[in-house]
């Protein structure tokens, strides 16, 4: 059996972040309940490596992503997360296409974050602070520029200054006035930023959250492990906290799991993304808003279907 392969280049040419955002929003309004999604299977491998199997279904599609997570790849100048997606139609369960898993992950993760960003952010947010300089940092920077094109200032911070400099230079080519944490103290920047993106493999909080202002949006996307966190409990305790699914967050999201153990938040206080999109839960504008994402299978399925429909068949020949 042979079927088409959609590459990174196909996705970047034919699919916008707004396309993915709209598909996810429509799915939450009409077709998908994240609480009913299949559990993600995480298989441990030697040396801290993992295999993740992420199946899902909707009224139209069935599919699964298989990805690897290898923390040792950073030193090899290879992607920490790699994989592919197999998309099938729901009726016959016939495979339709294989999609590059890295680019699918990047576009869907940013698009899910933008569902919250579009609600929280005003028309002209000013400054973005990014921790990390990998694929997720890149996709979130590009997606924010797409939905809020007048947003202009960017500060990027990471452990390797040369990587941060490269990220800042690339962001400048996309219209950002970009500087690094070497030029601007990131703890100071945290108190000045409208959006903070944490896209790292950190196991401890990245910054002291004391200075984070009411109205600030924090997109915490760097970890899906229950014992790792990028944010401190102080921030979780005083924020609107939006999650893809409450049970999933309480099981997998270290920022939530550890804060709950410390008494900073309860499951009942978490705001499910579906409830927010459907208008069933509201945000308190006097607080910061944290969106903690671990990445769920339904998101990949929805965006994979959108990609398949938007990439012309002729482009795959």
Image: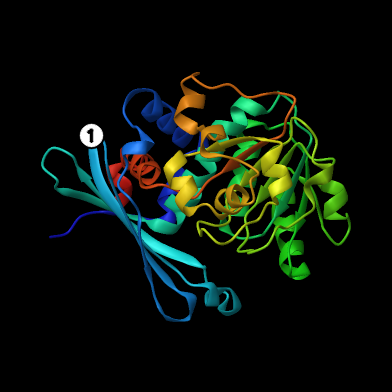
Q: Position of residue 102 (x, y in %)?
A: 45, 58
Instruction: Indicate the position of residue 297 as horizontal and vertical percent values.
Output: 36, 47
What residue appears at the point 59 percent right and 52 percent down from the top-left corner?
Answer: 261
Please say if 273 is above or below 300.
above
Quadrant containing the N terminus is bottom left
Q: Is residue 238 visible?
A: yes
> Is residue 174 shown to the viewer in this render?
no
- Residue 201, image x, y percentages: 60, 64
Which structural element holds mark 1?
loop
- Left or right side of 197 for 135: left
Few, some or many C-alpha atoms within 10 Å of disc 1 (few <14, some 14-19, many ≥20)? few
Answer above or below: position of 118 versus 250: above
Q: Which residue bears the numbered disc 1? A: 60
Q: Is residue 36 above or below residue 54?
A: above
- Identify the residue shown where x is 83% and y is 54%: 186
Q: Which residue: 46% across, 21% down?
A: 278
How many dots with numbers? 1
Which quadrant of the view contains residue 313? top left
Q: Residue furthest top?
A: 279
| Colouring rule applied to residues | rainbow
Give the residue drawn at x 40%, y 28%: 28
Location of residue 189 in the rendering, given as x and y in whole percent from the top left corner: 84, 47
In this view of the protein, which residue sits in the foreground, 313 or 222? 222
Q: Where, by quadrant of the figure, is residue 170 drawn? A: bottom right
């Amino acid at each position: 059996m042979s079927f088409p392969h959609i590459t990174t280049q196909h996705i970047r040419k034919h699919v916008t972040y707004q396309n993915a955002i709209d598909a996810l929003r429509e799915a939450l309004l009409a077709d998908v309940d994240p609480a009913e999604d299949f559990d993600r299977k995480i298989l441990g491998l030697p040396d801290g490596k993992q295999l993740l199997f992420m199946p899902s279904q909707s009224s139209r599609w069935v599919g699964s992503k298989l990805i690897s997570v290898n923390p040792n790849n950073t030193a090899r100048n290879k992607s920490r997360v790699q994989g592919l997606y197999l998309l099938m139609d729901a009726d016959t369960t016939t495979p339709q296409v294989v999609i590059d898993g890295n680019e699918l992950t990047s576009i869907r993760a940013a698009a899910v974050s933008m569902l919250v960003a579009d609600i929280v952010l005003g028309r002209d947010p000013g400054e973005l602070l990014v921790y990390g300089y990998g694929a997720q940092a890149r996709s979130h920077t590009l997606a924010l520029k797409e939905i809020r094109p007048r947003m202009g200032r960017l500060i990027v911070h990471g452990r390797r200054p040369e990587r941060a400099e490269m990220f800042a230079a690339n962001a400048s080519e996309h219209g950002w006035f970009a500087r690094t944490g070497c030029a601007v103290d990131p703890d100071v920047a945290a108190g000045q930023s409208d959006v903070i993106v944490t896209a790292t493999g950190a196991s401890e909080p990245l910054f002291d959250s004391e200075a984070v202002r009411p109205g600030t949006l924090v997109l915490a996307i760097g970890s899906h492990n229950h014992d790792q966190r990028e944010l401190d409990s102080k921030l979780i305790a005083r924020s609107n906290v939006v999650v893809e699914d409450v049970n999933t967050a309480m099981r997998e999201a270290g920022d939530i799991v550890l804060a709950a153990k410390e008494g900073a938040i309860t499951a009942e206080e978490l705001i499910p993304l579906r409830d927010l999109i459907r208008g069933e839960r509201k945000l308190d504008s006097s607080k910061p808003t944290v969106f903690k994402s671990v990445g769920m299978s339904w998101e990949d399925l929805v965006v994979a279907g959108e990609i398949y429909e938007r990439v012309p068949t002729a482009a795959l020949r």
